[in-house]
Amino acid sequence: MQPLDLSLLRSFVALIDCGSIQLAADRVGRSQSAVSMQIKRLEEDVGRPLFQREGRNLRPNPAAQDLLLYARRLLRLSDEALASLRHTDAAGVVRLGLPEDYAAYLLTPTLARFGQEHPLAEIELTFESSPALLRLLEAGKLDLALVTRDPRQPFAVLRRERFVWAASPEHGAWLRDPLPVALFEAGDLARRFAVEALQAADRRYRVVSTTHSLLGLITVAQAGLAVVGLVESSLPAGLARLGEAEGLPSLPIFDLSMVPGPGEPTPLAQLLHEYLVRDLRDDRPL
């Protein structure tokens, strides 16, 4: 029995993940015809078809789903083995800080890929407000931090994110006067920007909840108890974006910066910095 060819498995996994020959070919750096031939060879090796055609698309059948579990495991082991030999300098601990609301929707794919490609590296994550993260950086307790940039700070802008009002559409919290709001704890930039916008618009408000937790804000809003300010990309199901039509003032755009700690970075910190900057940079106008 011939062993499975890892190059065939890599194209197989790419095809299932991407959903089309064209996108899979782009991922693995081969032509579409080469990927098609690889899938045909893999089907010959396993002795059964793996896909059913639906127009131009290929849909994995039950046999493909079974093979997928083993393919991912084999590719991961292969990548880890190569990484442990080729990247012996990418070992150790790197300490990364970021606000909680950026963690789930911005960094998960990058951190997962970094961990796969550098299995000897360990990332310690700290979730805090941007001002608190900058203090930790200055104290030497972090190697890198993704922060919301205060307009007065000189950091380079990596990407921009919309900051918006949100609430449960079923409860109409924005119709109450004074406006019930839930905010992050004192010192957080999101809190400051929300309060400044309300004061500038002369909108009466009362703070009904203060928390350091993103989940806490979302829970209060989903229960219909308050309006909250959130990064638009992190809006969960059950909350609707609000604006001037609901009588709420506009909020500023958030500038995000990747800030290194003082002194010479370690090779591992520099490597993670390069990954994050490459993946997070977004020059699209808002």
Image (tube, rainbow, N blue to C red):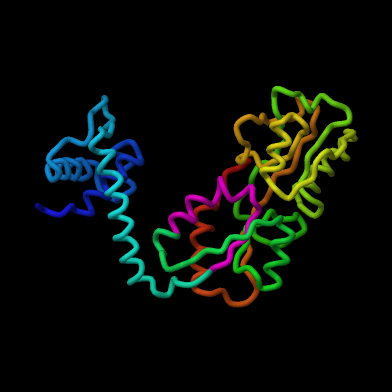
The residue closer to the viewer here, 94 or 254, is 94
Which image quadrant for residue 78? bottom left
**Spot occupied by residue 280 in the image (x, y as percentages of width and height):** 54, 52
Which image quadrant for residue 183? top right
**Spot occupied by residue 40 in the image (x, y as percentages of width and height):** 16, 40
Name which residue lies at 52% across and 70% down: 93
**Spot occupied by residue 34 in the image (x, y as percentages of width and height):** 20, 45
Which image quadrant for residue 118? bottom left
The quarter of the image holding the C terminus is top right
- Tell me if residue 71 is in the magenta stretch: no
The residue closer to the viewer here, 241 or 278, is 241
Name which residue lies at 31% across and 36% down: 20
Name which residue lies at 69% across and 53% down: 148
Residue 25 visible in the picture:
no
Q: Is residue 76 left or right of residue 153?
A: left
Q: Is residue 69 left or right of residue 219?
A: left
Q: Residue furthest bottom?
A: 264
**Spot occupied by residue 225 in the image (x, y as percentages of width and height):** 77, 31
Q: Is residue 29 left or right of residue 96?
A: left
Name which residue lies at 31% across and 59% down: 77
Highlighted magenta segment, given as a residue range: 94-114
Q: State whether residue 222 is above or below residue 25.
A: above
